[in-house]
Image: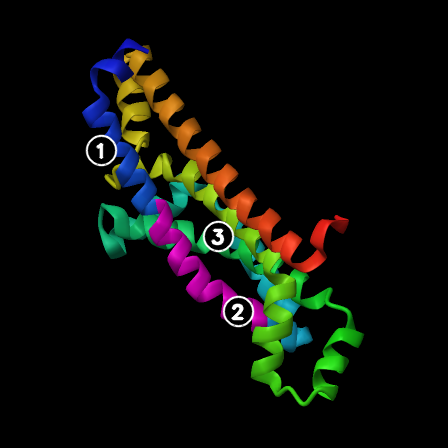
Amino acid sequence: MSYLINNLDLVGRLFLQHLRLTLVVLFFSLIIGIPLGLGLARVKWLRGPVLSLLGIIYTIPSLSFFVLLIPIFGLGTTPAIIALTAYAQLLLVRNWLVGLTTIEPAILEAARGMGMNGWQRFWQVEFPLALPMLLAGVRLVTLSSIGIGTIAAFINAGGLGVLLFQGVITANYDKILAGAIAVSILSFSANYAIRILERRAELAIYGNSK
């Protein structure tokens, strides 16, 4: 604990690096995952093959994945972002797909009866109803990226994993504890913030009935 108190500047800098890495991964995950999930919701026969592929990617050990990307992208944040974004797809797409495919057909039919085109149905009906599940996927992706992101320090991606690796190498348990506490604070804070957004989305749809 003394290391954390005496090195707040260093821990704070690594904390911000870790947060930035997580936000960048989340951004790219959403850019890829939302259209992909929407496409799978529309084309049923693609769901099995695509989800199977994403599942295979998710089972690749993180350190091995990072190392495989080094010859192509070198050391640093780039291979970390690519690997973490690839891992995120299964969690995000699966939740998003469930949210889209569990909407009552009668609701969509009513939207069609009101004269809504496909784009209007998506933005005014499907997206709001599926949003809680999407946010649940975002929460899982965020927590997963924070956790796996600590290993990215091994390939010089920075972040709080630096403290953990340095602490293990030098047998500095205060440094390990400082890194663990900082990662926990980041995880708990992210989980709490996104859970609030989930709850608000649920209240907007279901009111106080849930």
Q: Is residue 71 above or below residue 130?
A: above
- Give the class, few, some or many, for how many residues have Cα within 10 Å of label 3's Cα (few <14, many ≥20): many
Q: Is residue 164 magenta?
A: no
Label 2 element class: helix
The residue closer to the viewer here, 109 or 158, is: 109
Where residue 12 sits, quadrant-wise, is top left
In the rendered structure, does residue 23 fall within the stretch colored magenta?
Answer: yes
Q: CA distance from mark 2 to mark 1?
A: 34 Å
Q: Where residue 58 appears, x then y in whole percent?
A: 52, 49
Q: Which residue is mark 1?
A: 13
| Mark 1 vs mark 3, CA separation in Å | 25 Å
Please give the label number shown on residue 36: 2
Residue that label 3 marks: 88
Magenta extent? 22-39
Circle count: 3
Q: Looking at the image, is mark 3 or mark 2 earlier in the sequence?
A: 2
Q: Is residue 58 left or right of residue 41?
A: left
